[in-house]
Amino acid sequence: MAGVLLTGIAGFIGSHVAEVLADSGWAVRGVDAFTDTYSPQQKRDNVAALSGRAAVDVRTADLARDDLAELLDGVDAVVHLAGEPGVPASWGTAFGTYVERNIIATQRLLEAATAAGVRRFVYASSSSVYGPADRPLLETEAPRPLSPYGATKLAAEVLVGAYAQERGLSTVSLRYFSVYGPRQRPDMATHRFIEALLDHRPLPVFGDGRQARDFTYVGDVVAATCAALTAPVPSGSVFNVARGEPVQVCELIAILAEELGVTPRLEHRPERAGDSPRTEGCADAARDLLAWAPVTGLREGLRRQAQWHLRRRAAEPPGPAAPAQPYASVAGRQVQP
Ligand SMILES: NC(=O)c1ccc[n+]([C@@H]2O[C@H](COP(=O)([O-])OP(=O)(O)OC[C@H]3O[C@@H](n4cnc5c(N)ncnc54)[C@H](O)[C@@H]3O)[C@@H](O)[C@H]2O)c1
């Protein structure tokens, strides 16, 4: 059984990647620092969802500080998802954390992976490496990050390319576009909107709500990531992982509200620095070379995420803030708190 080191296994995307890799025959060694960027309990819950899979071994370590040689011992490939995510929080003094967790951690891991002779290193890059554009973004577009977060993701991607070119490591970088779905991070828009709708609270919308994002379902992102592990593509390749159908934030809210049967109340707030007015990725290269295509429609994906929020609430002990009424129906199913 081939072995893979999966960094960031306790996170939103990492926990999904672990499930699919384990179910497709990989021995998964996962590592996570369980940082407190958001609730470490949510991360423990993500890991708990993996229990029962004998092929998954979860270890706690900090890639920026701890010794990595043992983690890489005996693995054939690396999927590197660990990092400090989030555009708005990356300004100001938090930048040092982004440098440590996105750049230093990646460089240390690249060094260790090269020494261990792994056969493939897959890096989770981001659409945040691009500047604003009113056309579909191609991988050949000159990167122009609008935020400190994007700058650190790009710096790490450049390092990945350097290890490919100069140190003989076989790498693939994937630029994920606005990933959503079950277990999404609580700072992300779809998560915040669903929670506000379920609580009948106003929805915080930054700017006029017309900014468009290329929302891409987590299951599709996982499929691209797994394909990149074995695809016969040139080392140093970079691919967009995007659905290629941007949707305005206000349209996203309208779908969620319809699915949950709640009338949304929007609370407009000033635009945030670093937020691009529009992102749209062209994923033709991933289609051609990774034989990958997104298959999940936006409404279906949002329904699955909403169901996850409802299941999570149903499992929580009722607290003082729990709504007295049953939650709205999702896909025609009434879910009681
Ligand atoms: N979610 C998105 O829409 C999106 C879009 C583009 C790129 N990405 C990238 O995908 C990756 C995963 O994103 P996510 O949304 O699942 O984030 P996440 O925060 O849920 O997962 C990241 C995980 O990495 C861990 N981690 C952070 N620093 C670490 C370190 N030094 N050592 C070990 N573990 C560490 C965290 O504890 C966390 O569990 C990130 O690299 C992110 O930049 C995500």
Image (tube, rainbow, N blue to C red):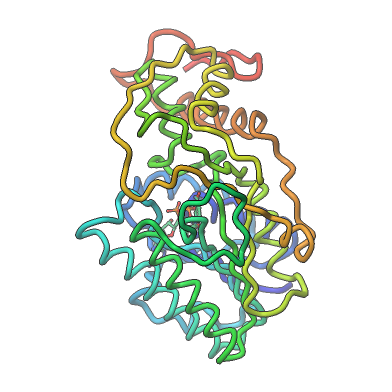
Ligand 1's quadrant: bottom left
* Frontmost residue, 228 versus 141: 141
Return the residue found at the far left. Answer: 93
Residue at the location (21% across, 57% down)? Answer: 92
Horizontal and vertical percent for residue 52? 62, 51
Res 212 seen here: yes
Residue at the location (33% across, 64% down)? Answer: 98
Q: Is residue 204 toward the left or the right of residue 18 in the image?
A: left
Residue at the location (46% across, 45% down)? Answer: 45
Q: Quadrant of residue 161?
A: bottom right
Instruction: Classify 71 as above or below 244.
Output: below
Horizontal and vertical percent for residue 295? 74, 43
Horizontal and vertical percent for residue 66? 36, 77
* Frontmost residue, 312 versus 177: 177
Quadrant location, the N terminus? bottom right
Return the residue found at the far front. Answer: 134
* Frontmost residue, 249 versus 313: 249
Q: Is residue 24 toward the left or the right of residue 6 in the image?
A: right
